[in-house]
Image (cartoon, grey):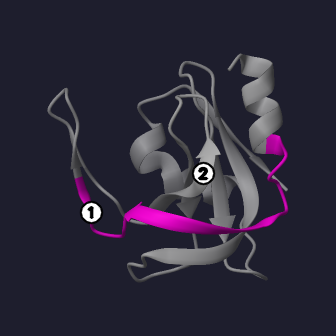
Amino acid sequence: MNDTERKELVRSYLGKTVTIGIDRPIGYEHRKKDGVCLTYPINYGYIPGVLGGDGEELDVYLLGVDTPVETYTCRVIGIVYRRNDVEDKLIAAPEGRTFTAEEMAAAVEFQEKYYDSYVESV
């Protein structure tokens, strides 16, 4: 998947309601290959069956849900574009909840600080 196709894919989800699977719930500790350990302050998952730029299921940050969940039906409210990686990520929230681009960027900073990324909101 080239950059244009990748961006078209994630942009096509803006404003849509999706059901996501959560594989890294709030509190999950992810030990990376370089020794960094990330503790997830938000739920993080994927859209089942939809492949992202890395060939794995398209990743989604879930904002506005303060307890760990296994699945969640939510609305896509933003995109994290990564300039120095092969994948971009969606940002979703419960229906009716809104966040500014700045609030979204702050919420995903725990992981995005390792990338050259920026947030676009609906």
The stretch of residues the image draws in magenta is 11-29
Quickly name the residue at label 1: 28
37 or 105, which lies in front?
37
Residue found at the very far left of the displayed protein: 35
Foreground residue among 59 and 78? 59
Secondary structure, mark 2, is strand
Label 2 neighbourhood size at 10 Å, few (<14), some (14-19), many (20+)?
Answer: few
Q: Is residue 105 left or right of residue 121?
A: left
- On the picture, is 87 further left or further right than 15? left
Instruction: Please state which of the two labelled residues, at mark 2 or mark 1, is closer to the viewer.
Output: 2
> In the rendered view of the protein, which quadrant contains the C terminus?
bottom right
* Residue lying farthest to the front in this orientation: 49
Which is more toward the observer, 100 or 56?
56
Q: Is residue 10 magenta?
A: no
| Residue 100 appears in the rendering | no
Q: How many marks?
A: 2
Residue under label 2, please give it: 49
> Which quadrant holds residue 66?
bottom left
Vertical arrangement, residue 24 with respect to residue 105, above or below: below
> Quadrant of the rendered structure where residue 114 is?
top left
Q: Earlier in the sequence, mark 2 or mark 1?
A: 1
Kindly identify the amino acid type of the residue bearing the numbered disc 2: Gly
The Cα–Cα distance between marks 2 and 1, rounded to whole angstroms, is: 23 Å
Image position, residue 61 (x, y; %): 55, 58
Q: Residue at x 19, y 26 (%)?
A: 34
